[in-house]
Image: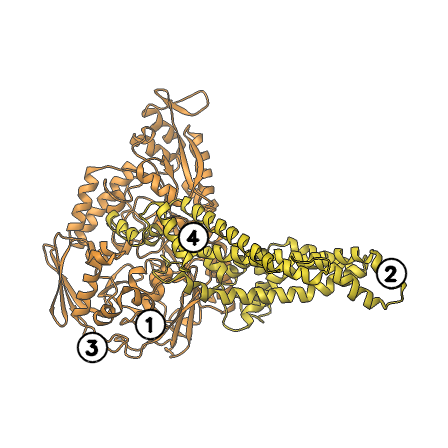
């Protein structure tokens, strides 16, 4: 078990390193640099621009910048933002992370709480009205772009009904709409999967056996069918972590929330290298961690899988 | 500028469009620019902005599109930054919403006849937020900080030509120039003053997050990506403002900013909304809407060194061949005004309307091309000496606002036998290649004079200008630019810049299309607004005179 974990972690580190390096390369392939953006149209002489570039080490050859960055990274130093002149990237991440974590944890809980029961019910009562309604809802949830859904819920709940603020985090109410939007797609995906999975499980021999030996239907479903049907769902849940984060970018932009997604888009626009690299690194680490966690949970849920 | 989506356009005070270019692009956002209209930039709806007795209290909320990454005056180029920074600081002179320079921390000022010195009498009894008195030492410190190359100030060039800054006495400052520079008053003297003792101790890095000025509001809370809150400063020299608080919320999506105004979550949007939203608010009497023109001209920079563009008649023909009004009407819903030369009509004091005009006239365009020796080839594209009258225009990648403009222009030009190919490239690539002369043409907005309300176009029209995108070389224009900077008398300066506009209209160094409109919408509950404005973003420096009614 520990050995397995160590191997997986090591692989994870390699993946994260590759992602970070690729980010570095891609960013530096983009023409321009943060200084050109910082300066804008201000009438700044080339010498001044060069001096500012030198100040930030951006006049060094790219391989040198890469080496410096690697060394800093190894020491846990993410560098500083050029655009927010000199503010450590770590500080920026710490400020932005709570918003994103809150959004995603809430969206995750909400979607699981809705999707599992709905999916199970739809799977058990296949082709019922409930199932059809659920299917239509799930299809819409997956198909509608979250950007559009965001604007629609703002118009409905903020403009027409006036129940919730259109943007910002003035109070807890500010979280309601973005969480709902984030949870929508997630709920749809999980519900569909749960339905299919439970339907398949209900056709299995062990379910027939359970029923044959006189177990209550609820016991058959909950203890046997659901437990088995959860396996693929868990895999997807882990895998969805990456999607959740990409959804966050849109939702944070539309609802004007100062989270990691906004930090990423803002810093990409400004080519704020250190910030983009740090966020990419963080996200890669998160996805890797989610995958490892999924595998571990898998082993826990499915007695047939043993981690060695 | 790399993908600048944001900031660009109109940063009005400094750089207007430079980045605009960039900016423009920002996806949906961009489209945003715009307001509508045409002749006279003035306020649209609303007459009743003023009205009523001022009331104290309350908070005014405005929305901007991009984070406020610093509160230092040196970083206040982008409009959203500037809106917060201007509440906290004052300058000796400030540009108002009608492009007039007003003495603020200066009580009066005088420029020597030879233009070699400017003397400012300072207002007395002004306090900084930390309780310190404002004196000549603070001015000297601030200006010297910008001038000192070791500080890498972004705005160092606003002090170009300054020889020394002297504190003559506690309330008199004299700025001596090495060479006369008339733009100093608009550029240098409008620099926000920081307290010498405090900034000296805390340094620029520290100051960016904890600014202390003489402004009507002092910093209360700063969360770069979320909001910036300033609160009334009781000891402000013009009196405590009516508002208790002024808050800038960062809302990237233009449609959400419009919803903010609609629901009352915010009182105004400092960065434009989508055109259709702006037009809707302008018609609604529940809102006060200001329509102003931008200073950056929407244009095709064209490399004058390229053989196809070397003949002035070709450039003039390109103007005549374009139905620019159709571009304005079809693409921008009428929210722009035709450009007549390099200066925007918003620059009322310097704008010269009597210049060569280029009405849509394809026949004249063809005649000019014939005259220049370009004859139609077999495929309809004109040729001369085996060369085709063909070039490539690089639009900014993803630029939803301007790409359609390029496509319509392409058709207009094709009709007279000029072939333009359209490709896309990121802003940084475009500016770099234009700079090096490695690109035929592009399409973006940029100021050719007008930044800070000063008409000097030395960066863009001087032969050696850093942003001379079209590689325009004209010795008369060069010497006029130099003369304009040396001339202090406003009437004489006007003559100089009028002549530059006439030369530009005759030479057509770049294909100028239009000046976009700029809308600023206010909720009616905001009272005390000025009656007219030519410069929308500059409105917000008056928040100290506004109240919630």
Residue tagged 2: A209
- Do callouts 2 and 4 mark residues in contact (Cβ within 8 Å)? no
Q: Are marks 4 and 1 on the same chain?
A: no
In the structure shown, which secondary structural element does the residue marked by tag 1 occupy?
helix
Q: Which chain is orange?
A: B
In the structure shown, which secondary structural element does the residue marked by tag 2 occupy?
helix
Chain containing mark 1:
B
Q: Are marks 3 and 2 on the same chain?
A: no
Residue tagged 4: A269
x and y, in percent, of residue B363 in the image: 39, 30
Residue A129 lies, with reference to residue A43, above or below; the image says: below
The residue lying toward the viewer, choosing from A95 and A294, is A294
Instruction: Residue B532: tell me if it is visible.
Output: no
In front: label 4 or label 1: 4
Q: Are marks 4 and 3 on the same chain?
A: no
* Number of numbered labels in the structure image: 4
Alpha carbon distance from label 4 to label 3: 44 Å
In front: label 2 or label 1: 2
Chain containing mark 4:
A
Alpha carbon distance from label 2 to label 4: 60 Å
- Do callouts 4 and 1 mark residues in contact (Cβ within 8 Å)? no
Residue tagged 1: B544
In front: label 2 or label 4: 2
Q: Which chain is yellow?
A: A
Q: Is residue B504 left or right of residue B244?
A: left
Alpha carbon distance from label 2 to label 1: 80 Å
Residue tagged 3: B125
- Do callouts 4 and 3 mark residues in contact (Cβ within 8 Å)? no
Chain containing mark 3:
B
In front: label 1 or label 3: 3
Alpha carbon distance from label 3 to label 2: 93 Å
């Amino acid at each position: 078990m520990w050995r397995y974990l160590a191997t997986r972690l090591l692989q994870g580190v390699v993946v994260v390193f590759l992602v970070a390096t690729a980010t570095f390369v891609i960013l530096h392939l983009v023409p321009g640099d943060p200084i050109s953006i910082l300066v804008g149209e201000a009438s700044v002489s080339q010498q001044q621009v060069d001096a500012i570039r030198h100040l930030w080490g951006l006049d060094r050859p790219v391989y040198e910048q890469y080496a410096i960055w690697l060394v800093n990274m190894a020491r846990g130093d993410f560098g500083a933002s050029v655009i927010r002149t000199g503010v450590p990237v770590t500080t920026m991440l710490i400020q932005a992370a709570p918003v994103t974590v809150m959004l995603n944890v809430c969206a995750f809980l909400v979607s699981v709480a809705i999707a599992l029961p709905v999916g199970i019910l739809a799977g058990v009562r296949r082709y019922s009205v409930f199932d059809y309604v659920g299917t239509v809802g799930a299809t819409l949830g997956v198909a509608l772009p979250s950007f559009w859904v965001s604007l629609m819920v703002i118009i409905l709940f903020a403009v027409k009904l006036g129940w919730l603020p259109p943007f910002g985090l003035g109070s807890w109410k500010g979280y309601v709409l973005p969480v709902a939007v984030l949870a929508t797609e997630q709920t749809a995906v999980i519900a569909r999967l749960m339905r299919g999975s439970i339907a398949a499980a209900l056709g299995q021999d062990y379910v027939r056996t359970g029923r044959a030996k006189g177990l209550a239907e609820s016991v058959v479903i909950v203890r046997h069918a659901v437990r088995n049907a959860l396996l693929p769902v868990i895999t997807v849940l882990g895998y969805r972590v990456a999607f959740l984060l990409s959804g966050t970018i849109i939702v944070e932009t539309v609802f004007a929330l100062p989270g990691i997604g906004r930090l990423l888009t803002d810093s990409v626009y400004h080519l704020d290298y250190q910030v983009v690299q740090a966020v990419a690194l963080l996200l890669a680490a998160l996805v890797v961690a989610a995958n490892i966690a999924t595998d571990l949970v898998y082993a826990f849920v499915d007695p047939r899988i043993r981690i060695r | 500028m790399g993908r600048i989506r944001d900031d660009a356009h109109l940063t009005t005070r400094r750089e207007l469009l430079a980045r605009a270019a960039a900016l423009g692009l920002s996806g949906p956002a961009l489209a945003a620019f715009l307001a509508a209209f045409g002749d006279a930039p003035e306020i649209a709806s609303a007459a009743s902005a003023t009205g009523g007795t001022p009331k104290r209290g309350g908070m005014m909320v405005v929305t901007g599109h991009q984070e406020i990454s610093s509160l230092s005056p040196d970083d206040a180029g982008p409009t959203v930054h500037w809106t917060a920074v201007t509440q906290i600081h004052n300058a000796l002179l400030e540009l108002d919403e009608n492009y007039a320079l007003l003495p603020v921390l200066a009580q009066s000022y005088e420029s020597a006849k030879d233009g070699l010195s400017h003397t400012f009498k300072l207002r007395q009894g002004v306090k900084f937020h930390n309780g310190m008195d404002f004196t000549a030492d603070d001015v000297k410190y601030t200006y010297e900080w910008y001038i000192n190359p070791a500080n890498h100030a972004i705005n160092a060039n606003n002090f170009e030509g300054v020889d020394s800054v002297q504190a003559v006495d506690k309330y008199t400052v004299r700025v001596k120039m090495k060479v006369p520079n008339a733009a100093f008053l608009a550029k240098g003297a409008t620099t926000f003053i920081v307290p010498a003792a405090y900034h000296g101790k805390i340094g620029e890095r520290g100051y960016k997050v904890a600014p202390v000025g003489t402004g009507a509001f002092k910093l209360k809370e700063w969360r770069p990506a979320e909001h910036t809150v300033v609160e009334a400063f009781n000891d402000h020299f013009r009196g405590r403002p009516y508002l208790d608080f002024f808050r800038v919320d960062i809302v990237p999506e233009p449609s959400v900013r419009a919803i903010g105004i609609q629901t009352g979550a915010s009182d105004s949007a400092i960065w434009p909304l989508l055109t259709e939203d702006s037009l809707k608010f302008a018609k609604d009497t529940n809102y006060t809407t200001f329509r102003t023109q931008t200073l950056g001209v929407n244009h095709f920079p064209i490399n004058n060194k390229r053989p196809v563009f070397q003949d002035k008649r070709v450039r003039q023909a390109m103007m005549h061949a374009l139905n620019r009004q159709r571009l304005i009407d079809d693409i921008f819903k009428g929210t722009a005004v035709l450009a007549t030369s390099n200066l925007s009509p918003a620059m009322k004091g310097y704008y010269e309307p009597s210049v060569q005009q280029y009405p849509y006239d394809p026949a004249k365009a063809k005649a000019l091309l014939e005259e220049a020796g370009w004859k139609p080839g077999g495929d309809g594209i004109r040729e001369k000496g085996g060369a085709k009258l063909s070039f490539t225009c690089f639009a900014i990648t993803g630029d939803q606002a301007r790409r359609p403009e390029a496509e319509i222009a392409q058709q207009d030009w094709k009709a007279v036998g000029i072939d333009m190919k359209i490709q896309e490239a990121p802003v940084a690539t475009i500016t770099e290649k234009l700079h090096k002369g490695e690109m035929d043409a592009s399409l973006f907005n940029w100021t050719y004079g007008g930044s800070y309300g000063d008409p000097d176009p030395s960066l863009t029209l001087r032969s050696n200008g850093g942003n001379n995108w079209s590689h325009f070389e004209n010795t008369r224009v060069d010497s006029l630019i130099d003369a304009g900077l040396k001339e202090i008398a406003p009437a004489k300066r006007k003559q100089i810049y009028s002549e530059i506009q006439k030369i530009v209209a005759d030479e057509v160094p770049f294909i100028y299309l239009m000046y976009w409109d700029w809308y600023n919408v206010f909720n009616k509950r905001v009272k005390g607004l000025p009656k007219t404005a030519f410069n929308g973003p500059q409105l917000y420096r008056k928040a100290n005179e506004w109240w919630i009614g």
